[in-house]
Image: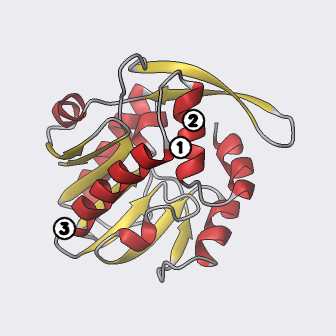
Amino acid sequence: MWEYYDRRAAQGVRGVNHAVEYWTGLGVEVSVADIEAEADELVRALRGLAPARFVEVGAGPGTFTALLPGRGIALDQSDASLRILLAGPAQVPVVRADALSLPIPDQGVERVYATHIYGILGAEDRRALVSEAKRVARELVIVDAGRPAGVPAEHWQNRTLPDGSSWRIHRRHFEGPDLAAEVDGDVLFAGRFYVLIAA
């Protein structure tokens, strides 16, 4: 799975058109305007958080990094993604590391952001991520995929990259209250396409 995301990094930051393509591929009727309107609400919710010292895990190419209030570092397992992030607008240091074994001391930051990583992990890895977040910070904030009507809560997806390679990827989609209950947190935003939870 991690090789897939490293190779996909060559496509750069995944914007609204990618989101429309993704949801349409799952049978959801959606427009660019739908995604943009919900993304604007998500951004307002993120920017409404108090500034904090943070680590963003699963930062990828930096889709959310510049939006996160406070000062921190962006962490990802993909060197290719981090190179793209460094070339973008976010002014944060980057670290290539495993989100399930963070190179951060106990309570070394105030907040962990998990941006679109929680929903691609299996159950054991999800528990490890939450445990690591609790070890290094007092708060975990999760940004992940919502669950429009008709989309399964959990399934395997077949994906193809521009180089022609095919990949089988595990994916979960969330209703806000369900994810909040899973991590013993609170819903900050729950839309069709995005959820934002603080625990």
- Disc 2 designates what residue? 22
What amino acid type is highlighted by mark number 2?
Answer: Tyr
Residue type (three-letter) at the residue carrying disc 1: Ala
Badge 3: residue crowd in 10 Å (few <14, some 14–19, many ≥20): few
Among the 4 quarters of the image, the one containing residue 69: bottom left
- Residue in view at x 48 percent, y 25 percent: 28
Tell me whether the residue at label 3 lies in contact with that at label 1, contact meaning CB atoms closer than 8 angstroms: no
In this rendered view, identify the residue nearer to me: 40 or 11: 40
Q: Is residue 173 above or below residue 44?
A: above
Contact check, label 1 and label 2, Cβ < 8 Å:
yes
Identify the element where label 2 is drawn: helix
Q: Which residue is mark 1?
A: 19
The residue positioned 35% from the left and 35% from the top of the image is 146
* Foreground residue among 74 and 194: 194
Few, some or many C-alpha atoms within 10 Å of disc 2 (few <14, some 14-19, many ≥20)? few
- Residue that carries the numbered disc 3 in the rendered image: 48
Tell me which amino acid carries mark 3.
Gly
